[in-house]
Image (tube, grey):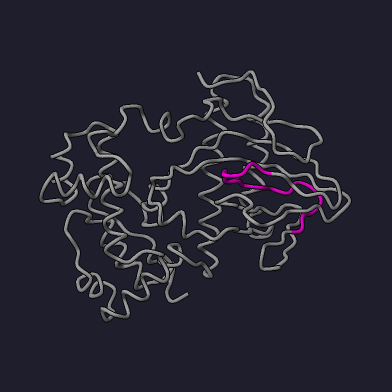
């Protein structure tokens, strides 16, 4: 870690899509996710935990322990009270009960694939938070989650989704505070790179050149580009462009303005140039942006059932029918 975490706290002047608070909050606010399923697994010794391919997960070991081994052969033990965040699911890894059994709470969620895609892809395959690191907040939020998943009162599905959201964000925050992060979170904890990110997030409209951003970071142009790309997973200009287009998408989804006006707001000189960049990032033109609200359109073809808990002794990742659905 090259600087104090104090550099994460900034007071923005405002602007399109901005929210008050620190820089980490600004970035995480653009990584939208939907938690839609909670399941308890009782995994027998030497049996693997089966999770749905393509989904992201937060796992909390309630009892026992799991052995995690990836393709490289690296092995870690996930003990009672530990949490593991799997942004891209298991991938090539295996999670096997290493004690007589393991009781695991699995929270499934889905990232909005269009929310700063470089940031999501730059996350490591596994983030492990040990009980000692997360005890201050996990001990409180997990029992609260389990109360909600057994609650038949109206609004329980939304509560569970929001709790999963909080757990993911708090996990990333805990990981940043370690000071050993990689990827874009590593960029936030690097004092110099964080200054450049601060400039882009506080003032997204100007077209910041590499030289101006390097000056903000207090680095030479070549050193800045190399360091930024290594930590963030995107070149400075590509990151800036994705950030502005993400803000533009928010405006279009909220129907705040016409396409041409949105293009000007995020710094494009012409609607044509904006439309080309928008289509390259999102796969469709800004005029074809669906009219459904984001919560209903992020994952077309998926069930709109609310979050749920499937209990019982199981090593599978299947979804059982549930009568509770979002209203």
Is residue 146 in the magenta section? no
Tell whether 160 sits left or right of 320: left
Residue beneath the point at 31% across and 68% down: 195
Q: Quadrant of residue 144?
A: top right
Q: Quadrant of residue 222?
A: bottom left
**Relative to 270, residue 288 above or below:** above
Tell whether 114 sits left or right of 217: right
Q: Nearer the viewer, residue 160 or 251?
A: 251
Q: How many marks?
A: 0
Q: Residue 166 location in percent, x, y?
A: 52, 44
Q: Nearer the viewer, residue 314 or 306?
A: 314
Residue beneath the point at 73% across and 53% down: 95
Residue beneath the point at 48% across and 44% down: 111
Q: Main secondary structure of the magenta part?
A: strand
Q: Which residues are magenta?
A: 51-67
**Relative to 132, residue 141 above or below:** above
Tell whether 87 sits left or right of 201: right
Q: Residue 50 location in percent, x, y?
A: 72, 44
Q: Residue 105 location in percent, x, y?
A: 70, 42
Residue beneath the point at 52% across and 30% down: 302
Q: Residue 143 location in percent, x, y?
A: 68, 39
Q: Residue furthest left?
A: 269
Q: Nearer the viewer, residue 202 or 210?
A: 210
**Relative to 7, residue 316 above or below:** above
């Amino acid at each position: 870690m090259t600087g104090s975490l104090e550099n994460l706290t900034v007071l923005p002047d405002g602007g399109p899509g901005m929210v008050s608070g620190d820089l980490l909050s600004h970035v995480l606010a653009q990584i939208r996710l939907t938690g839609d399923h909670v399941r308890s697994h009782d995994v027998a010794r030497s049996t693997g935990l089966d999770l749905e391919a393509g989904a992201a997960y937060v796992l909390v070991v309630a009892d026992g322990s799991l052995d995690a081994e990836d393709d490289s052969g690296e092995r870690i033990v996930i003990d009672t009270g530990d949490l593991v965040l799997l942004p891209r699911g298991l991938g090539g890894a295996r999670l096997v009960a290493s004690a007589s059994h393991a009781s695991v709470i699995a929270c499934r969620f889905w990232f909005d694939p269009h929310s700063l895609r470089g940031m999501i892809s730059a996350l490591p395959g596994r983030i492990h938070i040990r009980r000692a690191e997360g005890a201050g907040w996990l001990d409180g939020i997990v029992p609260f989650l389990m109360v909600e998943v057994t609650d038949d009162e109206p609004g329980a599905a939304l509560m569970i989704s929001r709790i999963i959201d909080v757990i993911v964000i708090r996990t990333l925050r805990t990981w940043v505070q370690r000071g050993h992060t990689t990827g874009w979170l590593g960029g936030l904890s690097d004092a110099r790179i964080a200054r450049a990110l601060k400039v882009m997030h506080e003032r997204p409209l100007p077209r910041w050149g590499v030289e101006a951003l390097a000056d903000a970071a207090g680095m030479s142009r070549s050193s800045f580009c190399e360091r930024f790309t290594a930590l963030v997973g995107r070149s400075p200009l590509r990151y800036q462009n994705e950030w502005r287009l993400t803000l533009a998408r928010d405006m279009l989804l909220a129907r705040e303005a016409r396409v041409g006006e949105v293009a000007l707001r995020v710094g494009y000189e012409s609607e044509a140039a904006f439309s080309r960049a928008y289509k390259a990032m999102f796969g469709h033109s800004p005029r074809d942006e669906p009219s459904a609200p984001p919560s209903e359109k992020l994952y077309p073809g998926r069930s709109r059932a609310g979050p749920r808990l499937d209990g019982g002794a199981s090593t599978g990742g299947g979804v059982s029918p549930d009568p509770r659905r979002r209203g």
